[in-house]
Amino acid sequence: MSGNPLIFEDLWAILRRRKLHFGIPAAIILLSSIALAYSLTPVFVSTATILIEEPEIPENLVASTVTGFASERIQMIRNRVMTNDNLWAIAEKIDLYPGERTIENQQAVIKKMRENIGLDMVTSEAVDPKNGRAITPTIAFTVSFGNESPELAQAVASELAQRYITEDRSSRTQSAQQASSFLKDEAQRLQDQISDLEARTAAFKAKNAGSLPESFEATSRFLQTAQQQLEQLDAKMAPLESRYAFLKARLTGFGASAELVKARDELAAAREKYSEIYPEVIRLKQAVEALEAEVNQGGSSSDYGYASSDPAYLALQSELQQVGGEISAIRSQRADLNQKIAEYQSRLARSPEVEREYLALNRNLTHDISSYREIMEKLASAQLAEELERSQKAGRFTLVAAASYPTSPSKPNIPAIILLGFTFAIGVGVGVAGLAEYLDHRIYGPKDLAAVFNAPPIAIIPEIAG
């Protein structure tokens, strides 16, 4: 063949020479593609459309406990629906693949079902109200199933769509219930903890009464008052003790003095009657001397018998008892005050340590009460959300297009297969023809001859027909 550029006439000449090289492979491939297209088993696909509805009640009024993007939730529901048990149950319910559906072939049947199930998201363009950015949220999704029978395809697609809706409703309600249950348990735990802390705090306050921070000033005032009262009692005590000593001294010598006066009177009367050597005078004289000596020594309590009826003695004795009673009362008061002062001082000494423990208890109690209130608020919201899910007022899946009845098979796509086969046949035919022409070194025209001899032919004899 010539190395010169090919023109249309050259290509047309090659095509005429290589028509069999081109036609036979092209015809074989085209006929094979047509046969393949019509020999494949037709598959009918039924599709159901499920809408993701927005909550009927705005989330700023009642927030749902079910969160996450719609696409993520759909995938989660899909994982639950597409379990082996669910798919096998659907196959048995609808009598799918009756010839293949055996226990031994269970996994193969389930795998075949998975391959024939389709899930596609439906999105739309929107603007995020929070930041104003363009987003493409998922607003719906389709569930499809392909089978040789249009009735079975529709039945399985309808069953799958219903299970998506049921599973969504069940999972949303279950999620809301779990949130409420968790918050109830947490609230009960905090309530028990608060009760325990309150009991411990009450016992601590009872045990350390007077040493608590709020009692510090009062205890200090009580201590100061007790010390002042003790000083006042000490001021009263000194004169009372002095008075008591004085009265006791007077009472001690009161009886002997009275007898001495009487004895002197009797002695004077006896001297008027008798002489100094008269026995009675001598006796009275000795008695006077003895009483004088006793008075000089302070006397004894044995002498009180005589003065017990003397008004002056009785007055002194009454006053002594009164002063003694006052002294005893003051001593009792002083003992009580000293005990109180010691107690107040002990309370004040324990105040720093008590304050530290008391503040720790109060801090824990305050924290738990705050947490309990927060949990109770969340629990109220969760219970509202649970009721919202139970009454189906929250976001949910709604079937907007039931599973369609396919009137024509979706697979195989016969026109596409034939077109693809035609394109491939042309390509193979051209390739075979080109390869045959490349391997053929015969001369077919002036260009080939000129290429061989490096000179143009002198004359060209045209082809003579007949």
Image (spheres, rainbow, N blue to C red):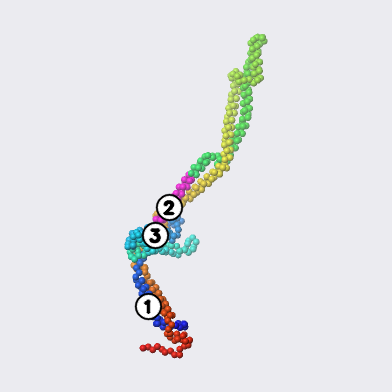
* Marker disc for residue 82: 3
Residues shaded magenta: 170-195
Position in image of residue 191 (x %, y %): 47, 46
Whether residue 208 is situated above or below residue 403 in the rendered picture: above
* Three-letter code for the amino acid on which mark 3 is drawn: Met
Q: CA distance from mark 1 to mark 3?
A: 49 Å
> Which of 137/453 is in front?
453
Residue under the point 40% across and 82% down: 17
> Which of 453/446 is in front?
453
Position in image of residue 110 (x %, y %): 37, 61
Residue under the point 41% across and 79% down: 436
Q: Is residue 176 magenta?
A: yes
Of discs 1 and 3, which sits in the foreground? 1
Tag 2 residue: 178
Q: CA distance from mark 1 to mark 2?
A: 72 Å
> Which of 144/236 is in front?
144
Which quadrant is home to the N terminus?
bottom left
Residue under the point 45% across and 58% down: 68
Tag 1 residue: 24
Name the side, left or right, on which 248 lies relative to 434: right
* Three-letter code for the amino acid on which mark 2 is drawn: Gln
Whether residue 249 is situated above or below residue 28 in the rendered picture: above
